[in-house]
Image (cartoon, rainbow, N blue to C red):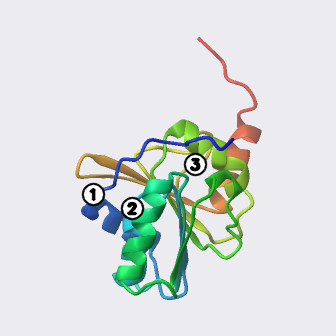
Amino acid sequence: MPISLAPFVPSNEAVVTRMLELAQVTSDDVVADLGCGDGRILISAVQKFGAKSAIGYELRADLYKTVTSKIQKENLSDQIQVFNEDALKADLTDATIITLYLTTSGNSKLKPLLSQLKDGTRIVSHDFRMDGWTYSKRENFQGHTIYLYNIPESLKQQTNLRSKFPFRRRY
C-alpha cells in the first residue's frame, strides 16, 4: 500500500517561481514534481520557464483529477504528464530537475531513489531539507526556506564530511 509522504499544502506562486529560479530551469530541462498536488509547479515550469516538459506524481485521486483537468484546460497535455502513482516508484530517468514540498521524513524515504539521479540533476525542496545531504544553496524567502541540491555534489560532500569526521566527540 502506498504511503503518503506529506499532506497537501500548496506552495504559493511566489515560492514556486523562486524554486524554479533557483533550479535555473531552461528549455533543456525536464521538471519532475513528486507529490505534485494541483500541478502549479509543473504548469509554471512549462509556461513561465519554458521547460521542455514536466512529469508529476500524485498519490491522491482527487488531486490527480484536478491537475489533469488543469493540464487539459491549458492545452499542455503534450508537455506535462501526471501519474496517479506512488512517488517512491517514480521513473525519473529523464528528469533534470526535481521539486519537492514534502516533510523531512518524506524526503528521507525518497533518498534512495534520488541518489540514483544522473549527474547535473538539481533538487529543490520547499521548507524541508534532505537529512544527511549537503545543500548547494539555502535561501530564506517570504517566510519559507528553499533548499537546492545538486547531484552528485550534494552526495559527495556528505561522503567527504564523513571521511574527515568519522565520529563525533561530545564534550
Q: Earlier in the sequence, mark 1 or mark 2?
A: 1
Q: In the rendered view, does 79 fall on the left or right side of 87?
A: left
Q: Secondary structure at mark 1?
A: loop
Front residue of 6 and 51: 6
**For mark 2, does the 10 Å Cα neighbourhood hold few (<14), some (14 to 19), or many (20 or more) residues?**
many
For badge 1, the amino acid type reads: Asn
> Closer to the observer: label 1 or label 2?
2
Q: Residue at x 73, y 26 (%)?
A: 167
Q: Secondary structure at mark 3?
A: loop
Residue identified by numbered label 3: 134
Instruction: Look at the picture and state if 116 lies above or below 76.
Output: above
Front residue of 2 and 20: 2
Instruction: Look at the picture and state if 166 lies above or below 23.
Output: above
Residue 98 picture quarter: bottom right
Q: Residue at x 52, y 88 (%)?
A: 78
Residue 62 picture quarter: bottom left
Label count reads 3
Front residue of 20 and 55: 55
> Residue 71's spot in the image, x, y percent?
41, 77
Residue identified by numbered label 1: 12
> Residue 96's spot in the image, x, y percent?
60, 73
For badge 2, the amino acid type reads: Asp
Q: CA distance from mark 1 to mark 2?
A: 12 Å
Instruction: Look at the picture and state if 103 lies above or below 14.
Output: above
Instruction: Look at the picture and state if 137 lies above or below 5.
Output: below
Res. 49 visible in picture: no
Q: Which mark is residue 38?
A: 2
Q: Residue at x 71, y 72 (%)?
A: 93
Report if the CB atoms under discs 2 and 3 are less than 8 Å apart.
Answer: no
Q: Earlier in the sequence, mark 2 or mark 3?
A: 2
For badge 3, the amino acid type reads: Thr
